[in-house]
C-alpha cells in the first residue's frame, strides 16, 4: 500500500470476526455469562485496521445488527482518535445491502453514519479478501494470540469483555 501512495490514516479496513478453525481445532466465539440467567451470550467482534500503520482496534458486539455495528464503529473511531478518509468494510449485510463488483449498494443508515464522520465507503469486492488483507490478517492474529489467552476467562458483561479484549490486544501488539 505504501508504494501506491497511501498516506497515514487514509484507509480503514473493517471486518467482523466469526468462528473459524485453526489447526483443525474449532474455536468458539468470544462470549460472556449473563449474571441473571447464567447463560453464555456469544458475541461478534468488529475489527478495524488502519492500512498504513497496521493499528488495530477490536470491540465485542452483541450481534451484527445495524445498531450494534454502528455503535461499535463509533466507539472504535473514538478510541482511534479520529476517522480516516475511506472505510473499506466487508460485504456484511449491515454495511452493504446489495454487493456488486462495480456498484455495490451501501445500507442508508451505515452510509449516513460514515458520512457523519466524513468517510467514504468503498466496500470490498465480493470474494476478494485481498481488498482488505490487512484486517483479515489481524482477525487471524486475534484468534491466535488474543482469543487463545482469553479462552479460559469468564466475563460477566460486554463492558468487562471489551476491557479484557482491549488489554490483551494492546499487550499482543
Image (cartoon, helix red, strand yellow):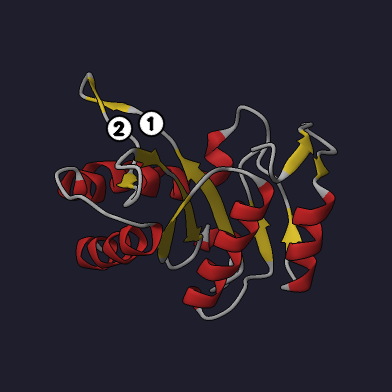
Q: Locate the C terminus and report the quarter of the image it occupies.
A: bottom left
The foreground one among 134 and 169 is 169
Question: Mark 1 = which residue?
Answer: 19
Question: Mark 2 = which residue?
Answer: 28
Q: Residue at x 26, y 62 (%)?
A: 164
User: Does the CB distance between marks 1 and 2 fall below 8 Å?
Assistant: yes
Per the rendering, the mark at residue 125 is none
Secondary element at image label 1: loop
Which residue, as the protein is rendered here, is positioned at the far top? 24
The foreground one among 100 and 25 is 25
Q: Residue at x 59, y 32 (%)?
A: 128
The foreground one among 55 and 72 is 72
Residue 54 in sight in this render: no
Q: Residue at x 14, y 44 (%)?
A: 152
Q: Is residue 23 above or below residue 154?
A: above
Residue 113 sits in quarter: bottom right
Residue 37 in sight in this render: yes
Secondary element at image label 2: loop
Judged left or right of residue 106, residue 27 is left
Q: Is residue 113 above or below residue 88?
A: below
Amino acid at each position: 500500500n505504501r508504494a501506491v501512495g497511501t498516506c497515514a490514516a487514509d484507509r480503514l479496513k473493517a471486518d467482523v470476526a466469526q468462528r473459524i478453525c485453526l489447526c483443525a481445532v474449532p474455536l468458539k466465539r468470544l462470549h460472556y455469562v449473563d449474571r441473571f440467567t447464567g447463560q453464555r451470550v456469544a458475541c461478534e467482534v468488529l475489527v478495524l485496521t488502519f492500512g498504513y500503520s497496521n493499528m488495530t482496534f477490536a470491540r465485542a458486539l452483541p450481534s451484527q445488527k445495524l445498531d450494534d455495528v454502528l455503535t461499535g464503529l463509533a466507539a472504535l473511531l473514538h478510541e482511534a482518535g479520529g476517522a480516516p478518509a475511506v472505510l473499506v468494510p466487508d460485504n456484511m449485510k449491515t454495511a452493504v445491502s446489495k454487493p456488486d463488483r462495480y456498484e455495490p449498494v451501501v445500507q442508508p443508515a451505515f452510509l449516513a453514519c460514515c458520512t457523519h464522520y466524513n468517510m467514504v465507503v468503498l466496500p470490498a469486492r465480493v470474494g476478494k479478501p485481498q481488498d482488505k488483507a490487512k484486517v483479515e490478517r489481524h482477525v487471524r492474529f486475534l484468534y491466535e494470540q488474543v482469543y487463545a489467552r482469553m479462552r479460559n476467562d469468564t466475563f460477566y458483561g460486554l463492558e468487562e469483555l471489551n476491557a479484557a479484549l482491549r488489554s490483551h490486544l494492546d499487550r499482543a501488539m
